[in-house]
Image (tube, rainbow, N blue to C red):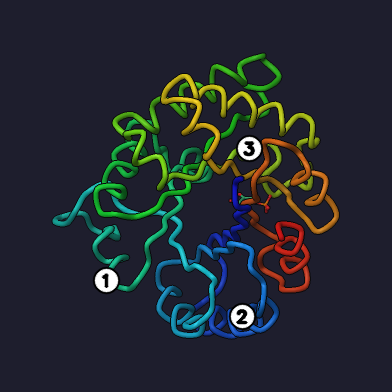
Amino acid sequence: MREPFIAGNWKMNMTPSQGAVFAASLKDALKGSRTKVMVAVPFVTIPAVLEVLKGSNIIVGAQNMSDQKSGAHTGEISALMLKDLGVNTVILGHSERRAIYGESDSFINRKVLLAIAEGMEVVLCIGETLSEREGGHLEEVLTSQVTEGLKGVSAEEMKKITLAYEPVWAIGTGRTATPEDANDAHAFIRGLVAKLYNEGVAEELIIQYGGSVKADNVAALLSKEHIDGALVGGASLSVEQFLPIVNFGA
Ligand code: 13P
């Protein structure tokens, strides 16, 4: 049985003071919820949110980290720094990092390996662009993102990995993949993981769907066999919108 995992990705929203106020109302709203929930918040907002969420089950994650351990890397944040704050989960390979900041599969893979070596958990994002899908390259793109992104990760270490399938064309557009299309992509990814590892690893792997997840489409998505959770952008910035999403994961 795979435990549903709902994550909010705040992206570049919420200053430390805004994040603290928001986290307090989220903590209150989610009191008693047993769903696995994470909020991935901007680096500088992490301490304020961690402080407010102390004593709750809500996981505080980061949205990125450096592929290097330390040293002359101006502007970067290391795994060690995150761990020192108490952050043990990091989103890697988000399509915005890939598209806007030119992160490649091999670069992302270095981050994945470093996070794992540091004992962290990873939400690795994958997903195709519209032209890749329309050009019939969906499986090819997912195959290379999964294969390259997970290179060097052992079957045992796969327990630390969550995959997030986020079709780029569905992110922030209000255009969600149909539950059937999303489930087909998830089934393909799970099959690929079975080939790369084994059936057991594939069966246990949590695969989140992301891309315009809202209160009114989450139930249909999560009812599908291979959709185990959600990675939520815009709707995670409002307690009113995020709460029903979390509750459908219950
Ligand atoms: P939206 O839910 O705003 O489409 O964003 C999805 C996403 O990119 C989460 O990482």
Task: Please identify the quadrant where the N terminus is shown.
Answer: top right
* Cα gap from disc 3 to disc 2, whole angstroms: 30 Å
Front residue of 32/121: it is 32
* Cα gap from disc 1 to disc 2, whole angstroms: 23 Å
- Which residue is drawn at the image coordinates 50% and 26% (left, top)? 199
**Which element carries disc 1, helix, strand or loop?**
helix
Find out if the beta carbon at label 2 lies less than 8 Å from the nearest ligand 1 atom: no
Dot 3 alpha-carbon crowd within 10 angstroms: few under 14, some 14 to 19, many 20 or more: many
Q: Which residue is mark 2?
A: 27
Report the residue that reaches farthest toward the left: 71
**Which of pointers 3 and 1 indicates the residue nearer the eye?**
1
Give the residue type that dot 3 points to. Answer: Val
Which percent across, then down, holds residue 89? Answer: 41, 58
Give the residue type that dot 2 points to. Answer: Lys
Please identify the quarter of the rendering in which residue 23 is found: bottom right
* Cα gap from disc 3 to disc 1, whole angstroms: 33 Å
- Which residue is drawn at the image coordinates 58% and 62% (left, top)? 36
Front residue of 180/108: it is 180
**Which element carries disc 3, helix, strand or loop?**
helix
Q: Which residue is mark 1?
A: 84
**Which element carries disc 2, helix, strand or loop?**
helix
Which percent across, then down, holds residue 79? Answer: 28, 58
**Which of pointers 3 and 2 indicates the residue nearer the eye?**
2
